[in-house]
Image (spheres, rainbow, N blue to C red):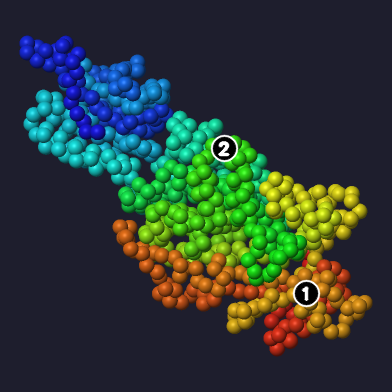
Amino acid sequence: RRTRRRATMADEAMNPVEGGEATAREYLDPPDYKKGAKPSNVWKYLKRFAPASKEGKNVECICEVTGEDGVTRPCGRLLTWQGSKMGTTNLLSHLKMHKNEYVECMSESSHSKMSNVNAMSLEDKNPVLDDGLATDDDDMPHDGMNTPPVNGAHDGARAHRGGGGGGGGGRDIKRASWHQRRDADDLDEDMDQFVTMSQLQHQQPMFPAEAADDTQNPIRGWTTRRRGKVINDPVHGHMYFPGIVVDAIDTPQVQRLRELKQLGTSYYVFPGASHNRFEHSLGTAHLATNMFDALRTRAQSHLRDALTGSDRVAVQLAGLCHDLGHGPFSHVFDNEFLPRRVAGWHAGDEPPWNHEAMGADMFRWMVDDNGMDLDKGVIDRVCDLITSSNVESATPGTKFLWDIVANKRNSIDVDKFEYLLRDQHSTGVKGNVDVGRLMSFMKVIDDQICFKASEVYNVYDLFHTRANMHQKVYTHKKAKAIEYMIVDALVEADVAWDSEISKSIWDVNEFIRLDDTILKRIEWSKESKLQKGRDLVRRIRRRELYQYVNDFAVPEQDIIGFKPVTEVDITSCQGDNNIPGGLRPDDIMVQNVKIDYSMKNKNPVDSVKFFQDYGDTHSFHIDKSKVSLLLPNSFIERKVRVFSKSKDPMYVEAAAKAFENYQRRMYKQELQLTPMRKRARNSQDER
């Protein structure tokens, strides 16, 4: 798209070379503006005409459209200013006021392949030089400083005032070289590879306009019925979602997530934790978009070429829909309820059902049920990203996409980023990880997301913050007590309803009916078979919870090969007590707590790769010993907790005594957190 001089037949007829002054109209070819051209692009282009005003000329800009038949026609919009009456600064202000006229003009030209803005001097018929062209897909607002470094705009204007002589050939060569460099991918050539996420958020439009062909072009693999939407979020601020994502948001399958608490029963302990999986899913889609765009920007040109618009949409939809398979009270459903009600569900074995696979099934049903126009390839890719499967089917240069939403390689993904940010915001529990910095210093090397070596501490903070949230929030003893009460109520309801709840996991049409409101269904049921379930829910309402007795941390040397403790193990050590018939397994609950750095007893940072300098094409591991001696030596801990279902001090004391005897039998000493007699004395006061 070099600047080129063309003399039309009409020009030659009106201004013959011999016997008169020849007029040379210069056609300055800007990018192929499409319908919905952004004001920033038009503004960036029009600013290049500013030098003409200093020569005291009237400058005319005409927007012309070249149709599919190859004929160029004016579209009827005209803007003229007198350079002699305004300086460059005023001219720029004048252009800024009228830039929307050009946007509107181009938007009306939906049939065009190209829009040409032609500039000429009206007084002496000398053309005005454009010393640089706007970019094809430049979404960033510009301040006019990103002009091509070829002699400067003012030098270009001077070079053409007297015709084409005087060194113009050298400038033309340089100008051609500049545009050849920009032709491959103008946006990526202009942008620094390692701008931070905060800079990206300010430079890129928060809610870009969508061209018609972005929403209605079936060649891209999707069409949409809606325009994009901006949603204001307390964690991420303004989040923009394109039309195809809005189509997915406004479906019953995604809207169901409004009725699923993100933190389950932790809401009963942290009143601010009222957020649902719906807003978490929006945030995950937002971060997934940011990560995709940032990684593509920093990638080498051949890697950028491997990525398509369909890849971006797949990542966005995977982030939005990754939690569609969660049941009532989130992880309580698949970790505690289903093992008690589904045949063949054995501890330690691969479960026959998981929420990730259910999420993929729900997504496929969502597309069909709502008539969403998505290609099969896009649908399959979204399901693969949700379940983190079939990565071997990825084309070279796109395997890193599997690490964005659900990273099985090292567990660093936007899902974790989002729930840590949102959960900390809602509970008031602070963490040290800087997610924005992590996303600002990552790039793709060898089809894997790598981090700058200086961020190794931040990576460790990510996993430490996650473990800290598990200790303080996710496994809070009161939240777990309520969790066990809800599970007992669900079991009672499932028995009374002929396994209606547990059977629903095999049918998406039934599963969509399950959410946290099932607790109210149990509470207000009038079925006699549900009396015990109703009593449990009403105990929760009155805060008459299962009583926490005590816990102990499993010694480090016993963690590997640890066998979960059962209620029978505890009651078999009860000794003498005043309970008629003694303490029974049904009188207590045993929780086996496991908190790790996401990869059991392994250090997840051993699976993370780093780079030293921004231009590096090779990555490496960083051994923990080279980072800090203050980092943990163990990456997993296990605890055993005991709850009494009755708040009667006699039952609490009997459970505490049995728990103490179990520790002596297994470890030859008491390992529990608090001495038994203190727990017994305070048991009635603990709420």
Total residue callouts: 2
Above or below residue 284? Residue 117 is: above
Apparent side of residue 205 relative to residue 81 in the rendered image (left or right) = right
Q: Position of residue 643 (x, y in %)?
A: 77, 70
User: Is residue 610 among what the camera can see?
Assistant: yes
Above or below residue 658? Residue 60 is: above
Q: Judge the density around disc 2: few (<14), some (14-19), many (≥20) Cα neighbours within 10 Å.
A: some
Q: Residue at x 50, y 68 (%)?
A: 604
Which quadrant of the structure image shows residue 598? bottom right
Apparent side of residue 233 relative to residue 457 in the rendered image (left or right) = right
Q: Which numbered dot is residue 372?
A: 2
User: Is residue 83 among what the camera can see?
Assistant: no
Q: Position of residue 664 (x, y in %)?
A: 73, 86
Which residue is situated farthest in the bottom direction here?
668
Q: Look at the numbered disc 2 and give the secondary structure of its residue.
A: loop
Q: Look at the numbered disc 1 and give the secondary structure of its residue.
A: helix
- In depth, the one of 506 and 25 nearer the eye is 506
First-in-chain label (1 vs 2): 2
Q: Amino acid at mark 2?
A: Met
Q: Residue at x 30, y 57 (%)?
A: 615
Which residue is situated farthest in the right direction here?
580
Residue linked to disc 1? 567
Q: Which numbered dot is residue 512?
A: none
Q: Amino acid at mark 1?
A: Glu
Q: Position of residue 378 (x, y in %)?
A: 50, 45
